[in-house]
Image: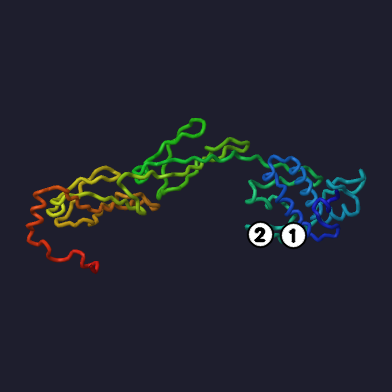
Amino acid sequence: MDLYSQLGVKRDATEAEIKKGYRSLAKQLHPDRNRDNPKAAERFSKITTAYDILTDKNKRAQYDRGEIDEEGNPKSPFGFGGGGSGAGGGFRPRTGNFDFEPSGETADLSDLFEGLFSGGQRRASPFGGARKAPPQKGADLAYRLAVPFADAAMLKDQRVTLTGGKTLDIKLPKGIEEGSKIRLAGQGQAGPAGSGDGIVTFSIAPHRFFRREGDDIRLELPVSLDEAVLGSKVKVPTVDGAVMLSIPKGSSSGKVLRLKGKGFTGKTGQRGDQLVTLMLDIPADDAELTRFAEGWPAKGKGNPRAGLGV
């Protein structure tokens, strides 16, 4: 096949049509997309050579006159060498897409694949040397790590065991939440250009009485009638350990008290709070309490639900 047929264009094709034909084929045949298809890699090399020649004005003219072959080599031992490079065959990629426009630079296809594939390709020699794919890093490895609720709140280091038995102590990221990820450089599979990375996805285990709300932690705290009526100091669990909490005199069930700095560590490094909701715990069968309520002077007076419109 001649160079025009290799790119699927007519012999009188414009430079823009040649670039368009090459661009379409290159995306299909690039070695990074055809690792197990040597024929695709061979054809990719051929269309790249065709592109190099046909976008060089001098070489294209030499090829059209029959002075050089499909690899850019002179057809006559005393003939016309193909080493020169014309001024008009370059292109410049626009950022983020494959929309090209002419420029005054010599064609360099390494930019074409930068960012789209795993790396640029080495440019072929003027006489048709095959392009070789650059060495590739090994594949990334995915890990999932379940983190205890309290450890996640305090950003406590976690020990992970990687493939192959290696163990690492890793730091939890600020603002950690369900599905947060970190990258462990060089902890993936080995490859010719170095090892890939380990990608750790975090899952935060639920707690039996704590509940997360943003960077705050919610806790429902049972209190007795006398503690609520008379006020008291009680021991309260937090992710950092138990602390003493003062319950104001005359507290009602549902009252919320705040423990500063006992929540999760946010992205700024500042910790949220623990919000403690008081839950009045009244015994079901306490005869003395029953008698007190029956003889309570305020019994039946006032309506605690008036604010609800009932």
Q: Is residue 124 visible?
A: no
Residue 125 image position (x, y, % from top left) = 78, 45
Quick check: 136 above or below 95?
above
- Toward the bottom, the furthest residue is 309
Q: Nearer the viewer, residue 152 or 49?
A: 152
Tell which circle, 1 or 2, labels the residue nearer the N-terminal end: 2
Q: Quadrant of the C terminus?
A: bottom left
Residue drawn at (75%, 57%) of the image: 20
Quick check: 15 above or below 306?
above
* Left or right placement of residue 302 versus residue 221 in this view: left
Residue drawn at (77%, 45%) of the image: 43
Q: Nearer the viewer, residue 224 or 197?
A: 224
* Left or right placement of residue 101 versus residue 285 in this view: right
Residue drawn at (45%, 48%) of the image: 180
- For label 2, the crowd category at 10 Å Cα-Cα, with few meaning under 14, some 14 to 19 and many 20 or more, is few
* Left or right placement of residue 27 versus residue 288 in this view: right
The tag on residue 300 is: none
Foreground mark, 1 or 2, reads: 2
Q: Is residue 63 visible?
A: yes
The image quarter containing residue 98 is: bottom right
* Left or right placement of residue 69 versus residue 300 in this view: right
The tag on residue 94 is: 2
Q: Which residue is mark 1?
A: 104
Going by the numbered disc 1, the residue's amino acid type is: Gly
- Toward the top, the furthest residue is 165
Q: Secondary structure at mark 2?
A: loop
Going by the numbered disc 2, the residue's amino acid type is: Arg
Q: CA distance from mark 1 to mark 2?
A: 15 Å
Q: Dots 1 and 2: beta carbons under 8 Å? A: no
Residue 27 image position (x, y, % from top left) = 70, 51
Residue 205 image position (x, y, % from top left) = 38, 43
Residue 289 image position (x, y, % from top left) = 10, 51
